[in-house]
Amino acid sequence: MIWDWAFALEILPTLARAAVVTIQATLLGFVIAALLGLAIAVARIAVPRAGWAISVLVELIRSTPLLIQIFFLYFVLPNFGIVLDAFAAGVIAIGVHYAAYCSEVYRAGFDNIPRGQWEASIALNLSAWTTFKDIIIPQAIPPVVPALGNYLVALFKETPLLSAIAVLELMQTAKIIGSETFRYTEPITLVGLFFLAMSLVSAMLIRGVEELLNRRTIR
Amino acid sequence: MGIGTLVAMLVTTLVVIGVLATQETYSLFLPGLLQGAWLTIQITILGALLAVVMGVLAALSRLYGPAPLRWLATVYVEIFRGTSALVQLFWLFFVLPQFGILIDAFSVAVLALGLNVGAYGSEVVRGAIGSVARGQWEASIALNMSRAQMLRRIILPQAFVAMIPPWGNLFIELLKSTALVSLITLGDLAFRAQQMNQTTLKTVPIFTLVLLIYLVMSLAITIGMRFLEQRASLGLARGRSA
């Protein structure tokens, strides 16, 4: 028999436990990506001299595969005395990778702020910190939330890469089940369905948030 | 980034690789890695061809196809955009043989990555067709063109220009996702790196070289697409004049 329902039900609890790890990795990775991305985007504006170096760095991160970056953090950093366990290395790699993408999203948000807002902040003698905190960021973030949401979904779909450094997330668990029982059909299909369901749900959520924000911001 | 900066970055990267290659700790690994890179390039090119074909087919079926074809295209796009590329790769590699369909790892790699990127590409094509100015459609109808004529002569040539930059991004995504094929036993760049790392434990030189080689390949794609964009937009009165 090609598809065995009993077997599928039997492995479901194991996969569900692994799904928790996948979701943890997604959320932690996205927190890093969102905060570090914001820091990069702000640094680009606040320190114009560093702009060139930051562009090269962002380009470097975006042009190389995430898998290699995960390996790099996991295998290379210990040579410099920084030992990270697989989960931490993976989450940091994913977070930094997507921070590069998110920084571009924030940049688009900052670029859309009318110049008058910056000039008014200078005229009111606001410090750079207050300008960003109270004037620019509250206006720049809401329009880019949908784009950030898309990256959250993209990041979520990259988490199976963590299986390459043996983090026990969904894909790795499915592979282990497969190699123990010689049945790959059920575990891998279930993982695929889980990702499909989660992606569709989050796409709907993002659309909801988008509408909510559009109602709130006055255009 | 301007095209000049990109070329400068490419040249710098090549120089860095060249300088590193003079050192024995690095030159040892270069031939093996370049062999792997060749496989990466093959998968990228074939995958890109498949992606373009699938992208255009899916977009046209979703826009103009009869209902069953439209649903089929929608299901294809949603499934391949909704699940992770690695899961798709494993599914084709491990699950298809259970149904009696045996394909070699290389074909699985090209198929999975091409179909995956093609699903994203179909949205690009759809968006680009939608972005052609309304007047162009109306004028084609006024000139009594059939739908095929309208698409072929008026709409697609203009949509083509709008598609190039997003396709460029997708090709880089494709190049980067070829690193996944190392997990289904193909000897691409990422696979060679892991293998050498396991046998020699010279992690720093190996992974530094690998990152630099990937960087060279993505910069080459970016620069190539920029040139294509410049060529394709010649004669179109769009945007700021150069």
Image: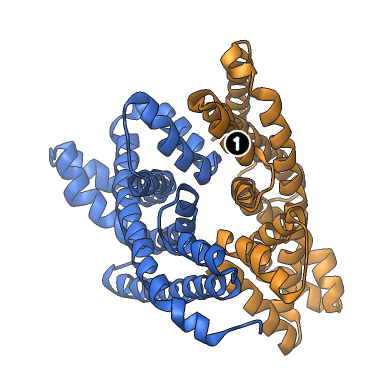
Judged from this view, the residue extending furthest toward the bottom is B67
> What is the x, y in percent for residue B6?
59, 30
The correct choice, above or below, for B108 with respect to B59 in the image is above
Q: According to the image, what is the colour scheme of the structure? A: by chain
What residue do we see at 53% from left, 72% from top?
A187
Chain A: colour as depicted: blue
The answer to which image quadrant residue B206 occupies is top right
The quadrant of the image that shows the N terminus of chain A is bottom right
Q: Is any part of residue B120 visible from this angle?
A: no
Q: Is any part of residue B188 visible from this angle?
A: yes
The quadrant of the image that shows the C terminus of chain A is bottom left
Rendered orange, the chain in question is B
What residue do we see at 40% from left, 50% from top?
A102
- Residue type, mark 1 in image: Gln
> What is the x, y in percent for residue B72?
69, 81
Q: Which residue is mark 1?
A: B195
What residue do we see at 31% from left, 46% from top?
A38
